[in-house]
Amino acid sequence: MALRVAARTRGEIIGADSRQLFRELTIGVCSPSAAERSGVPHRLIGEVSLAERFTARDYASRARAYIARIHAAGGAVIVAGGTGLYIGALLGGLTDLPEDAACRQRLETELRAAGSAALHERLARLDAASAERIHPHDGLRIVRALEVIELAGRPLSALTDGHYRTPRPPWQARLVVLARPRHELYARIDRRVEQMVVDGVIDETRALLEAGLREALVSRKALGYEAWIAVLEGSATLAEATRRVQQAHRQYAKRQITWFRHAPGAEWRMLGAPAAEDVLAAELIAWLEAGGASD
């Protein structure tokens, strides 16, 4: 849908996927193909290294700079992706949270020495709500949560209630959620994971391990790669790993649905029939051509 609308509006696509953002990940995160990217300019796809620290605030800042540049050139902007944190940061901004490089460095040293599980246990004692949201292997987010707690003297979850705030950006935006019947959605997810295997996700994972990026993959919660690693290490068959990744993607889709149900102003559109997609594409093209997203 993003490609279709962009092609008709001299538009550019800005990715809102927190894993397609990384240049080292392609097959396992279903990044747009080379042909798709050559036909329509894409931003924030494959622009960041797994080794870099990149936050939702960084995303919002870079995306807003792209939007200003595209609007100045007379183009339309289509943001496509399902990372709710990034979309919320782009549309509404983030609360200001304390930062201190020395504190973070000390916590990162502890992370390397004690492991993410130990720091996650500490986080659970200090801020159960944040610990529930953050995976025990997500060292980057665990460290950030502990950093904020230490500097602010309050739980991160207490500080981020009402996480997104006004004022909104100086342009109009529509948040359109493309939905499908649940059985159809799950069938599409299963086929997509099977296609990853055909496209060479195991070879991609092997190359990532050989490049020394295993820890980065785990800490970034790059969905599915742990299962593909298990295949390479002989602790799971390819069939077992495929089923695990399919299940993980279905579970993630459920969490996305929950997030977007609570997103302010979200417009839900049920797809499935070609006519429904045609109607929606025409509506969005007309809205953009009428200047709906201009400054």
Image (cartoon, rainbow, N blue to C red):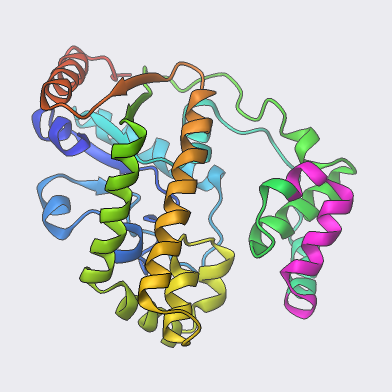
- Examine the residues drawn in magenta and state their main secondary structure: helix
Residue pushed farthest top? Answer: 290
Q: Give the range drawn in magenta.
A: 112-131
- Look at the picture and state if 252 lies above or below 262: below
Foreground pick, 86 / 229:
229
Foreground pick, 164 / 273:
273
- Look at the picture and state if 11 lies above or below 224: above
Foreground pick, 118 / 234:
234
The spot of residue 148 in percent (x, y) is 78, 48
| Quadrant of res 285 | top left
Q: Tell me if residue 31 can be seen.
A: no
Q: In this view, does 194 lie to the left or right of 82?
A: left
The spot of residue 42 in percent (x, y) is 24, 47
| Magenta span includes 128 | yes
| Magenta span includes 85 | no
- Look at the picture and state if 274 lies above or below 36: above
Residue at 66% of width from left, 55% of height from top?
Answer: 141
- Look at the picture and state if 83 lies above or below 37: above
| Quadrant of res 181 | top left
Residue at 46% of width from left, 33% of height from top?
Answer: 257
Residue at 46% of width from left, 71% of height from top?
Answer: 227
Q: In this view, does 43 lie to the left or right of 90?
A: left
Image quarter of the C terminus? top left
Foreground pick, 68 / 141:
141
Q: Tell me if residue 155 can be seen.
A: yes
The spot of residue 43 in percent (x, y) is 30, 47
The spot of residue 110 in percent (x, y) is 80, 73
Image quarter of the N terminus? top left
Q: In this view, does 59 lie to the left or right of 284?
A: right
